[in-house]
Image (cartoon, rainbow, N blue to C red):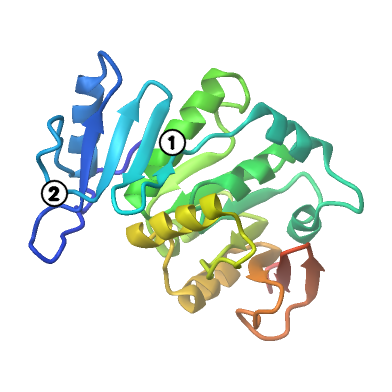
């Protein structure tokens, strides 16, 4: 379900920085409903000076950036999900960090849902939380299309839009593992598409939470462990992780909790 009463982002002249448009035939009512749910202006004439636009098209909902020409659409491909389920040589470092199945996982900084879907594809029961309403709308549209194509089950991952510091303590039953992916600067070697995606997320302010405060809440809520995703060379979010699992570009720091 979409979060309601999203805040339009004003530019320095007070005009809405995000508007909702539609190019899919017969979808104007759905686009208007989306605009109302998100608290954004609906504009089918391109008259509003909105550098960012949520555009409802035949292939789904996408965020367009007029300045860079970037287009962000959330999609979960069948081939990618098959690769995740199959695993890889040497084991998946994220799977090793999260812990053995069966396990309830809360992804508290879900962003565009890729790690949440990754974990669901591996067989974990996932509750995903993202506070940014625009990012959540994009993910919910991607999940809807994936579920319509029978690529994902209806109830995994379960998506929540809101502040993880409030939502984590309310999860019942409590998660075995809480997963955190604080936003960090993209590496230069990343593709142009990945850099454009990161720029759009930063324009939205997606999951730019107080990482230290969220970590403290995560430690109080996780039954067994908290896992923090970091760049390989970055300092740990908190000192003295109990285990570290390294991939090619990132690592996963594991912190055992007192509730284990």
Q: Foreground residue, 14 or 235?
A: 14
Residue 86 image point, x, y percent: 83, 36
Is residue 194 shown left or right of residue 32? right
Is residue 172 shown left or right of residue 240? left
Q: Badge 1 local density, few (<14 within 10 Å), some, or many (20+)? A: many
Label disc, if present, on residue 49 of the rendered structure: 2
* Above/below status of 116 relative to 252: above
Q: Look at the image and tell me in which quarter the C terminus lies.
A: bottom right
Q: Foreground residue, 65 or 42?
A: 65
* Above/below status of 105 relative to 139: below
Residue 130 image point, x, y percent: 44, 53
Q: Looking at the image, is mark 1 or mark 2 earlier in the sequence?
A: 2
* Above/below status of 221 relative to 79: below
Q: Are marks 1 and 2 in contact (CB under 8 Å)?
A: no
* Above/below status of 185 relative to 170: below
Task: Give the number of the mark in front: 1 or 2.
Answer: 2
Say if residue 235 shows up in the picture: yes
Q: Badge 2 local density, few (<14 within 10 Å), some, or many (20+)? A: some
**Label 1: which residue?**
140
Q: Residue drawn 34% across and 60% down? A: 203
Q: Look at the image and tell me in which quarter the N terminus lies.
A: top left
Say if residue 174 shows up in the picture: no
Q: Residue drawn 14% across and 41% down? A: 41
Residue 69 image point, x, y percent: 36, 47
């Amino acid at each position: 379900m979409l979060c309601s009463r999203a805040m339009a982002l004003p530019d320095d002249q007070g005009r809405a920085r995000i508007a909702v448009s539609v190019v899919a035939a017969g979808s104007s009512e759905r686009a208007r409903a989306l605009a109302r749910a998100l608290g954004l202006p609906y504009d089918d004439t391109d008259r509003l000076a909105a550098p960012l636009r949520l555009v409802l098209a035949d292939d789904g909902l996408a965020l367009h950036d007029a300045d860079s020409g970037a287009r962000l659409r959330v999609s979960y491909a069948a081939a990618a999900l098959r690769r995740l389920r199959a695993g890889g040589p040497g084991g998946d470092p994220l799977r090793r960090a999260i812990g053995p199945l069966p396990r309830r996982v809360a992804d508290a900084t879900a962003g565009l849902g890729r790690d949440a879907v990754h974990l669901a594809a591996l067989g974990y029961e996932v509750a995903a939380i993202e506070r940014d309403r625009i990012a959540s709308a994009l993910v919910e549209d991607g999940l809807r299309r994936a579920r319509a194509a029978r690529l994902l089950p209806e109830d995994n991952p379960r998506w929540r839009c809101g502040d993880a510091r409030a939502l984590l303590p309310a999860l019942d039953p409590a998660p075995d593992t809480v997963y955190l992916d604080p936003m960090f600067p993209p590496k230069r070697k990343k593709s142009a598409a990945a850099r454009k995606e990161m720029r759009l997320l930063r324009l939205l302010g997606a999951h730019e939470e107080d990482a230290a405060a969220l970590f403290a809440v995560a430690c109080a809520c996780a039954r067994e462990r908290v896992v923090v995703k970091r760049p390989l060379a970055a300092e740990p979010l908190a000192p003295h992780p109990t285990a570290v699992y390294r991939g090619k570009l990132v690592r996963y720091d594991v912190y055992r909790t007192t509730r284990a």
